Amino acid sequence: MNEKKKTKGETLREGLALVGEFTATLRIQNMFIDREIKIPLGKNMIVNTGLELALTRLKDASLNPVSHMAIGTSSTSESATQTALGAETTRKSATVNTSSYFIQAQATFSSTEINGTQEIGVFNASSGGKMFARKVVSPAIQIPSGFNMTLTHKATLSRA
């Protein structure tokens, strides 16, 4: 973080923070109940390729924007140098929304797809591409057969 002197001993701090967070939403719907349960999965790692993607998109469109979410079964801890999930099982197109200071990606996975998931990633392509963020969850996700779970990743830009 850079610090610059203002007048009379005051300090002005400059810096930015890009913070990502995952949540899961399980929708329970049958003839007796219609309810959504939101499950916070916590903050995640914006990986180095994610920082590269964000900064390159500020300059030009030489890299595709965030567009997909993937899940996998690796429990390897998050690291800034990772460029892919450890054991990807499914990747889906994500609904991506932006606001003044955040970008949000969402994708819905069936119980068959998501059960056993321990890692989640956000990417800019349907395969390969640049990984923006990665999250490891423990224990592995398990939902009842026949249900769906929507995963949401929200990355917020703020002054540090």
Image: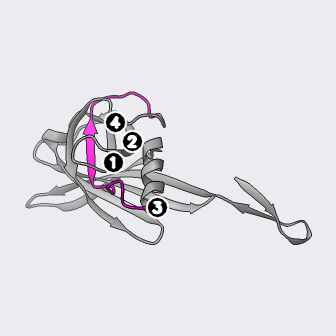
Circle 2: residue type:
Arg
Q: Residues within 10 Å of mark 1 (few under 14, many from 20)?
A: many
Q: Mark 1 or mark 2, which has the lower sequence index?
A: 1
Q: Measured from the top left, where is residue 87 in percent x and y?
A: 27, 29
Contact (Cβ within 8 Å) of mark 4 with mark 1? no
Q: Earlier in the sequence, mark 4 or mark 3?
A: 3
* Chief secondary structure of the magenta portion: loop
How far apart in space, not on screen, are marks 1 and 2 (Cα)? 7 Å
- The secondary element bearing badge 1 is classed as strand
Horizontal side, residue 69 vs residue 133: left or right:
left
Q: In the rendered structure, which amino acid carries the disc numbered 1?
A: Val
Q: Nearer the viewer, residue 53 or 113?
A: 53
Quadrant of res 27: bottom left
For the point 32% across and 55% down, the residue is: 64
Residue 17: x, y in percent? 57, 55
State the mark number for residue 122: 1
What secondary structure is found at the residue carrying circle 4? loop
Image mark for residue 59? 3
Location of mark 4 (residue): 84
Crowd tier of the residue under label 2, counting other residues whose Cα lies within 10 Å: few below 14, some 14–19, many 20 or above: many
Magenta stretch contains residue 46? no
Instruction: Kindly check if marks 1 and 2 are in contact, taking CB atoms under 8 A apart as contact.
Output: yes
Which badge, 4 or 1, comes first in the chain's sequence?
Answer: 4
Q: CA distance from mark 2 to mark 3?
A: 24 Å
Task: Write the start and end of the magenta stretch as one range.
Answer: 59-78
Q: Is residue 47 visible?
A: no
Give the Cα separation between the discs numbered 4 and 3.
Answer: 24 Å
Instruction: Classify mark 3: residues with Cα within 10 Å, few (<14), some (14-19) or many (20+).
Output: few
The mark closer to the camera, 4 or 2, is 4
Q: Nearer the viewer, mark 4 or mark 3?
A: 3
Mark number displayed over residue 134: 2
Q: Quadrant of the C terminus?
A: bottom right
